[in-house]
């Protein structure tokens, strides 16, 4: 659980992250009903290909450490998919330091990372842990 | 049990479409049928997490009741930081108002007994709660007799503080009354026990308080029944660096056995010596909470065997045991582990009661320990079912001689972990 990584590390890795978020944020919100519909009829696949229902299960592991408004451990809900995917793969490939995140990311497959990315991008801070 | 096929789920799922981004999307309420009942005993990091995740993800399809006698729950994790003066007690104490607002029924009564044949929990006040699935997360009980001379009554003089609340406050008061030149004795428990690095973090907090008060002669004697302990090299390095000469750890080869504690005189007798101590912190051996043992969920070890794929009790397919009361294989008994196990249990329960999708179990843990201000070390790993138990897949641990900046960062992480996990458990 501790999908821990520092906010600074996340931002350092993705210098245009804020811009990406701005661009992707509204689109992700607008995409929600479609994604929900696809989940209901199509086995929980989102428009970007990630299995959102799987992402929801896997995300529970992250929520032990990540929450909105924290200074060191970055919030994940609402994060744009490219930023999330790039960051987690960097930990998985040990390109970015942090033993906790390297351990957590180390066992994630590409499919699981895509599922998490889709889930977090499409979900607002919610009652599961992030406030 | 609800007979709820995936075809019907798809037909009904449209009702969730307009519910917004945060609405639960799966397993809608079964129309025309009584909702299946989940009862959870214990509102700590294991039980509280199961209740919230089943409730959140089942869209109201499961009737969730949480039984927790305390209206305000003080966490055992971070209670050492209270002893060390880094946290206040209110900052590690949490209520259940947010949980209640999520439509979980919270019953502030003790669970007196479990009737597994009738699938009922009997409450201390006489009420009965029927269940389709039951989660048992009572934490630990102490084996008072594991330390000769110790007892529940002796804990008023020689606190254990291994269950948080008044005992933790008593320990802090006694620590603050220690005079320079006095002796403190800690007796450490045998494996398995709650929070493996906890006793040694507590020793560090004792030493920090004494050092801050200018003590030069006070000794902390740590009497262990184990030949080694969690993060031993890191703690010993830290004690030598921050508190040189203050901490004396003795394994059984050194002290030869703990023979007797005497609450009236404050004496602790080992084969090697008799210590007259101003503070004796006795952490006895442990076992699963009484209700789990009385219900026949424990094995001779005193803890409860579970199926590693589901967190289901090996004794009863309708019962799950999570947290410190279970036998977690390679996982340590920690709040992090309990929270992780709870998510596997919640996913399984949802699958069984609402036909929601199920996924392979996966577990994780990290334990942070504070040795001195801004000097925090961590150990952790990932776990999966294997060889009939929860088996460690990967692990990491802080390194000796690390840069101060890394240790400081660890401390910041630990603070944010605490905020996040308590939000996960209590809302």
Image (cartoon, rainbow, N blue to C red):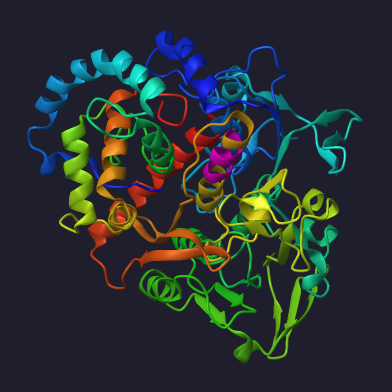
Read off the magenta span. B343-350
Q: Is residue B293 visible?
A: yes
Residue A15 image position (x, y, % from top left): 7, 37
Q: Taking B359 as reference, is B326 left or right?
A: right
Residue B33 image position (x, y, % from top left): 70, 17
Q: Residue at x 75, y 60 (%)?
A: B142
Q: Residue at x 34, y 46 (%)?
A: A3
Residue B220 image position (x, y, % from top left): 57, 73
Q: Is residue B316 above or below residue B267?
A: above
Farthest residue to the front: give it. B7
Q: Quadrant of the C terminus of chain A?
A: top left
Q: Does the magenta portion include B345?
A: yes
For the residue pair B50 and B44, the one nearer the viewer reads as B50
Name the magenta segment's main secondary structure.
Answer: helix
Q: Residue at x 77, y 32 (%)?
A: B131
For the residue pair B156 and B109, the one nearer the viewer reads as B109
Q: Does the magenta portion include B306?
A: no
Q: Is residue B206 visible?
A: no
Quarter assignment of residue A30: top left
Q: Residue at x 69, y 21 (%)?
A: B35
For the residue pair B55 and B98, the one nearer the viewer reads as B55
Q: Is residue A14 above or below residue B409?
A: above
Q: Is residue B7 above or below residue B74?
A: above
For the residue pair B333 and B405, the one nearer the viewer reads as B333
Quarter assignment of residue B121: top right
Residue A126 image position (x, y, % from top left): 42, 24
């Amino acid at each position: 659980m501790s999908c821990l990584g520092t906010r600074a590390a996340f931002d350092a890795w993705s210098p245009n992250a804020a811009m990406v978020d701005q661009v992707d944020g509204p689109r992700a919100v607008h995409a929600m009903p479609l994604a929900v519909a696809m989940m209901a009829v199509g086995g929980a696949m989102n428009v970007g290909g990630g299995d959102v229902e799987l992402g929801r299960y896997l995300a529970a592991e992250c929520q032990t450490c990540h929450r909105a408004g924290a200074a060191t451990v970055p919030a994940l809900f609402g994060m744009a998919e490219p930023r999330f995917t790039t960051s987690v793969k960097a930990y998985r490939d040990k390109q970015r330091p942090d033993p906790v995140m390297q351990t957590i990311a180390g066992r994630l497959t590409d499919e699981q990372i895509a599922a998490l990315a889709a889930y977090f991008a499409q979900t607002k801070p919610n009652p599961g842990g992030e406030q | 049990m609800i007979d709820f096929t995936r075809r019907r789920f798809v037909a009904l799922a449209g009702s969730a479409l307009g519910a917004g981004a945060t609405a639960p999307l799966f397993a809608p309420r079964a129309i025309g049928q009584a909702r299946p009942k989940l009862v959870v005993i214990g509102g700590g990091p294991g039980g509280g997490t199961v209740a919230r995740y089943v409730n959140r993800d089942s869209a109201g399809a499961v009737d969730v009741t949480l039984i927790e006698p305390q209206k305000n729950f003080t966490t055992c994790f971070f209670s050492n930081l209270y002893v060390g003066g880094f946290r206040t007690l209110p900052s590690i104490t949490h209520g259940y108002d947010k949980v209640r607002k999520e439509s979980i029924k919270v019953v502030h009564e003790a669970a007196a007994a479990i009737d597994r044949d009738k699938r009922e929990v009997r409450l201390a006040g006489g009420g009965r709660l029927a269940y389709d699935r039951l989660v048992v997360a009572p934490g630990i009980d102490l084996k008072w007799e594991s330390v000769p001379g110790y007892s529940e009554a002796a804990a008023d003089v020689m606190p254990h503080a291994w269950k948080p609340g008044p005992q933790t406050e008593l320990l802090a008061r006694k620590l603050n009354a220690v005079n320079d030149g006095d002796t403190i004795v800690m007796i450490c428990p045998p494996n398995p026990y709650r929070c493996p690095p906890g006793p040694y973090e507590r020793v560090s907090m004792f030493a920090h308080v004494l050092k801050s008060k200018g003590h030069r002669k006070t000794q902390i004697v740590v009497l262990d029944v184990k030949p080694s302990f969690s993060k031993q090299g890191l703690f010993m390095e830290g004690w030598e660096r921050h508190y040189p000469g203050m901490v004396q750890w003795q394994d059984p080869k050194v002290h030869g056995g703990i023979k007797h504690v005497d609450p009236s005189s404050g004496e602790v007798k080992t084969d090697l010596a008799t210590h007259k101590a101003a503070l004796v912190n006795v952490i006895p051996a442990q076992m699963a909470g009484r209700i789990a043992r009385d219900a026949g969920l424990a094995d001779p070890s005193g803890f409860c065997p579970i199926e590693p794929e589901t967190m289901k009790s090996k004794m009863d397919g309708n019962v799950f045991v999570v947290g410190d009361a279970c036998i977690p294989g390679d996982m340590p008994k920690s709040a992090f582990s309990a929270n992780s196990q709870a998510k596997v249990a919640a996913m399984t329960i949802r699958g069984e009661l609402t036909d929601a999708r199920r996924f392979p179990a996966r577990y994780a843990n990290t334990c942070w320990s504070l040795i001195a201000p801004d000097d925090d070390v961590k150990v952790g790993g990932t776990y999966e079912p294997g060889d009939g138990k929860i088996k460690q897949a990967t692990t990491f641990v802080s390194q000796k001689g690390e840069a101060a900046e890394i240790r400081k960062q660890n401390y910041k992480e630990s603070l944010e972990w605490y905020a996040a996990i308590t939000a996960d458990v209590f809302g």
